[in-house]
Amino acid sequence: MMVYDLEGNILESYDLTKGYLQPKTVIKPEAAPIDNVEKFAWEDGDYQEILVYIPFANDPTPTRLDRLEAQLVYTAMMTGTLTEGVLA
């Protein structure tokens, strides 16, 4: 299966420690429109599966784990189940 970057360029190598692969269904480039102008419905053979390499964000915004921990604390506070030292 072909691996592409976000701009649609084919990738020969990629680092899965710095990003992840996301499957995507696209229309084959050689698929021709029936009316030679525009096509809204394609035949089953006009589709192909590809993988898109999505790099992880390198910004200082809260990580997914930080957001999950904050939501957990909020939920525990709202339900009255917060115990001291649980998230230490």
Image (cartoon, rainbow, N blue to C red):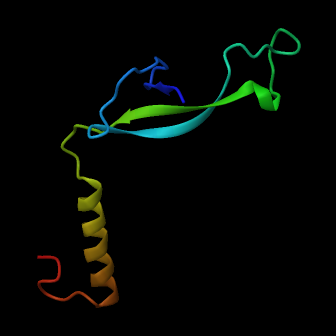
Where 39 sits versus 88, above or below?
above
Residue 83, horizontal then vertical, whole percent: 19, 89
| Res 82 → quadrant | bottom left
Residue shown at the point (45%, 20%) measured from the top left: 7
Counting labels gives 0
Kindly give the residue lying farthest to the right in the view shown.
Answer: 35
**Quarter of the N terminus within the rendering:** top right
Q: Is residue 14 left or right of residue 29?
A: left
Is 45 left or right of 22, judged from the image as shown? Answer: right
Picture residue at 18% right of the left edge, 43% below the top: 60
Question: 69 above or below 11?
Answer: below
* Residue 16 percent across, percent down from the top left: 32, 38
Foreground residue among 42 and 1: 1
Give the residue at x 80% y 27%.
42
3, above or below 78, in the image: above
Q: Quadrant of residue 28?
A: top right
Q: Quadrant where the C terminus lies?
A: bottom left
Q: Is residue 12 left or right of residue 83?
A: right
Q: Residue at x 29, y 83 (%)?
A: 76
Give coordinates of residue 45: x percent, y percent: 78, 28
| Residue 5 image point, x, y percent | 43, 25
Of residue 55 and residue 78, the one placed in the foreground of this image is: 55
Q: Which residue sits furthest top?
A: 36
Q: Check the image and report above or below for 68 versus 55.
A: below
